[in-house]
Amino acid sequence: MAQIKREQWGSKIGFVLAAAGSAIGLGNIWKFPYIAGQYGGAAFILIYLICTAVIGLPVLMAETLIGRSTQKNPVGAFKKLTNGSKFWQSIGGMGVAAGFIILSYYAVVAGWALGYIYQAASGVFYQFSKPEVAGQYFNGLISDVVWNVGYFIFFMILTMGVVYAGVKNGIERGSKIMMPILFLLLIILVFRGVTLEGASAGIRYFLHPDWSHVTGEAILAAMGQSFFTLSLGMGAMLTYGSYMSKKDNLPSAAVSIVTLDTLIALLAGLAIFTGVFATGLSPNAGPGLIFHTLPVVFTKMPGGYFFSILFFLLLTIAALTSSISLLEVITAYFVDEKGWSRHRAVLFFGGLTTIFGLPSAFSYNLLAKVSFFGLNFFDFVDFVAANILLPVGGFFIAVFVAYFWGFKKALPELKSGAEKLFEKYYWTISVWKILVKYFAPVLIFLVFLNSIGALKLIADIF
Ligand code: TRP
């Protein structure tokens, strides 16, 4: 078979925007605000920032580095660096499988966001007097098979379309268009939020440190969130890194990605809580905040009709730049390792993911009564992927770089394109080594134990 030259990003900013697009998603706009609210606002944010510096950034660098040095998908990368170790290849394979699973349910929620652009435009929110009514309406929609599955498939087609067009012409170009729109939309929404009468209560709620909520559980939640929100542990950053040139400065790109991701999460929190407080609603809706509370918030603010459309557009774009990175991991694997064409891989696995995602979409209607270990199918696959596969993958990525590949080989790779950093600020590299070698594996392992409930069990025994 003729070797086709592997694609590369057209520019350094292309990589940064695509990777930031992967990182910035439902996790930033939907999850971060409500867990920050739950766990003590600024106190939680501070801990989250520390976790991001101590685990997020170092693991992001390690993962991207594996990709860039090998210029391969997760399986091929481990194969190349270990001379074909079956164990390490299976870690890469687990990442590809995780990508498949996450995409299958992530796209269901993304479909709801997409559907809500239309709902917002239809003006239906104005019939909602309070969040309970909006919540009922929302439950009605997701229990409608045609609505739920229809938007899910619609969203999958969008995702497949971008990945089908290629790394440079699809993912990079798409990110270069969508990311600036995302920033702009968010800035408009923050501006709307903070200029509302009564917004200061929301700012206070979000940014006032309440240390009484900061428990061990909050710290673990912060660690888990900083890991999830950076798309770590399943080879998405590895795959995006594999299209990066060795002339580019990897540590500085990683810092930009982390900064953008964090900034967006904070701005999303500001936009949401200023609106919630200014309209006198409760900030404690948890996961329901976006679909139950926000529609009512919009009906009560000047210009709400317009801003509600922008908000769900923002949410959809954020989800789309994440979902393409998930599909790209699977695609890269079949293109590199199995010799498939990109188009065939995208159509086949995009289609297969859609089929596998159906039970997640059915979890709110046809399969609402079916449970797996006490969870519906959607929550079950989310649990397996986010709480088991991702931390396990992240753990092994850190362990691999520190103990198997080794810094002796990894450092020259990291240095490529970052020569100045190595000369002037070598201490930052020394810190990175310590974090990857000791901190990241131990802390990720703790998050893992916590999320499978083992820590609670241990705590109960003592
Ligand atoms: N980071 C994404 C978000 O914040 C979610 C996510 C987790 C993800 N792991 C991923 C996205 C892997 C792409 C690839 O919403």
Image (cartoon, rainbow, N blue to C red):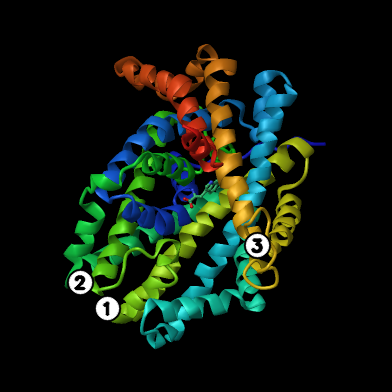
Of 64 and 98, nearer the camera is 98
Quadrant position of residue 252: top left
Asked whether residue 267 appears in the rendered view, the answer is yes
Residue under label 1, please give it.
301
Establish whether ligand 1 lies closer than 8 Å to the Cβ of label 3.
no
Per the rendering, the mark at residue 360 is 3
**What is the x, y in percent for residue 424?**
29, 17
CB under 8 Å between discs 1 and 3 = no
Residue type at numbered disc 3: Ser
Q: Which is nearer the N-term, disc 2 or disc 3?
A: 2
Does residue 90 appear left or right of residue 255 in this picture? right
Q: Is residue 69 above or below residue 316?
A: above
Task: Choose mark 2 or mark 3, whichever is in front.
Answer: 3
- Residue 301 position, x and y percent, is 27, 78
Q: Is mark 1 within 8 Å of ligand 1?
A: no
Q: Position of residue 196 (x, y in %)?
A: 20, 71
Q: Depth check: 328 or 47 in front?
A: 47
| Residue at which label 2 appears | 196
- CA distance separating discs 2 and 3: 38 Å
Q: Please report the residue visible at 62 percent of the width from the left and 59 percent of the height from the top.
A: 378
Dot 2: element: loop
In the image, is residue 112 above or below residue 24? below
Question: Dot 3: what SS?
Answer: helix
Front-lying residue, 276 or 324: 276
Residue 8 showing in the rendered view: no
Q: Please state the horizontal and vertical placement of residue 233, each as a whole percent of the image.
A: 55, 37
User: Which residue type does callout 2 highlight?
Assistant: Leu
| Residue found at x 36% / y 33% | 53
Mark 1 or mark 2, which is nearer the start of the sequence? 2
Which residue is the extreme one toward the bottom? 127
- Asked if labels 1 and 2 touch by Cβ distance under 8 angstroms, the answer is yes
Q: Quick check: 422 above or below 211?
A: above
